[in-house]
Amino acid sequence: MSQAKPPGLPLLAPVLGGLGLLAGMLLIAEGGHRLSTDPPSIAPVQGAGEPQPASQVRVRDTRPGQPARKIAQDLIAPPPLDPSAIERVEPRPPLSELGLAPRPKTPMPRDWRETLLFRPVATTSAVLEAMGRKVAISGTVDIDPDRTCTFDNTAWPCGQRARAAFNAWLRGRALKCLLPPDADRFAIAAPCALGKQDVGAWLVSNGWAMAAPTGIYGKAEAVARDARMGIFGPPQ
């Protein structure tokens, strides 16, 4: 036999569900009232609102600059000078010729070329002949073969000795001279070199030739005179 269900049970379930929903909403509302909406209070920092002392506040000085106070003026200050008593003197000479600007070199013509002269022979102390050309060493003054020099009241044929010394140094070795293309037609003054040795510098520094007034061997001649080299020394 089947039992009959009470007639009020199907209507009771929706009522209970509505009461539960209403109870939940009341709990949420009550919890919201209990929460505080004010921010937490923070204890004020001691001295934060107080004005800073004047010694700690940076103040820009807008006053015009004051001159520095002079200290020990009589000891470190320069003495007063009268401009009219100041005299400009000439600059001192250089300590040596190394400090002087080099003399400008005379430009050589463009058609002059370095030419090898084989088997040169000295005719005087600074003039040579080779391959049909006659060349005088530029920047020098030769000693005439007939010249006689005197040293300590002793005369000796320094001209012949100077020519012999030049030939002994050459020994027939080839010279490199800067010559024009038609130098075989006339005698010419030209610079020459034996290997890396400047011929004019060797002659003047050894006292076998003198420096030309406008040449570059003036210092070499002074050294030869002081050392009594070549024609400036005793008979050889």
Image (tube, helix red, strand yellow):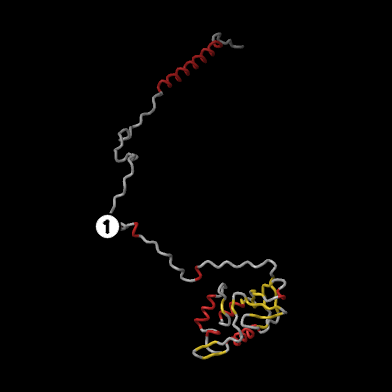
Residue 32 showing in the rendered view: yes
- Residue under the image location 50 percent in, 17 percent down: 21
Place of residue 184 in the rendered image (x, y in percent of width and height, measured from the top left) = 72, 76
Tag count in the figure? 1
Task: Label 1: state its secondary structure.
Answer: helix
- Is 120 on the left or on the right of 75, as rendered? right
Residue 58 showing in the rendered view: no
Quadrant in which residue 38 is drawn: top left
- Is 227 on the left or on the right of 105, as rendered? left
The residue under label 1 is 74
**Other residues around mark 1 within 10 Å, as few (<14) / some (14–19) / many (≥20):** few
| Residue positioned most to the top | 7
- Residue under the image location 50 percent in, 90 percent down: 153
| Residue positioned most to the bottom | 154
Place of residue 190 in the rendered image (x, y in percent of width and height, measured from the top left) = 65, 74
Seen in the picture, residue 46 relative to 133 is either above or below; the reply is above
Place of residue 88 in the rendered image (x, y in percent of width and height, measured from the top left) = 39, 61
Seen in the picture, residue 109 relative to 206 is either above or below; the reply is above
Place of residue 47 in the rendered image (x, y in percent of width and height, measured from the top left) = 30, 35
| Quarter containing the N terminus | top right
In front of the other: 118 or 138: 138
Q: Report the amino acid beneath label 1.
A: Asp
In front of the other: 144 or 38: 144
- Residue under the image location 48 percent in, 15 percent down: 22
Quadrant in which residue 209 is drawn: bottom right
Quadrant in which residue 36 is drawn: top left
| Quarter containing the C terminus | bottom right
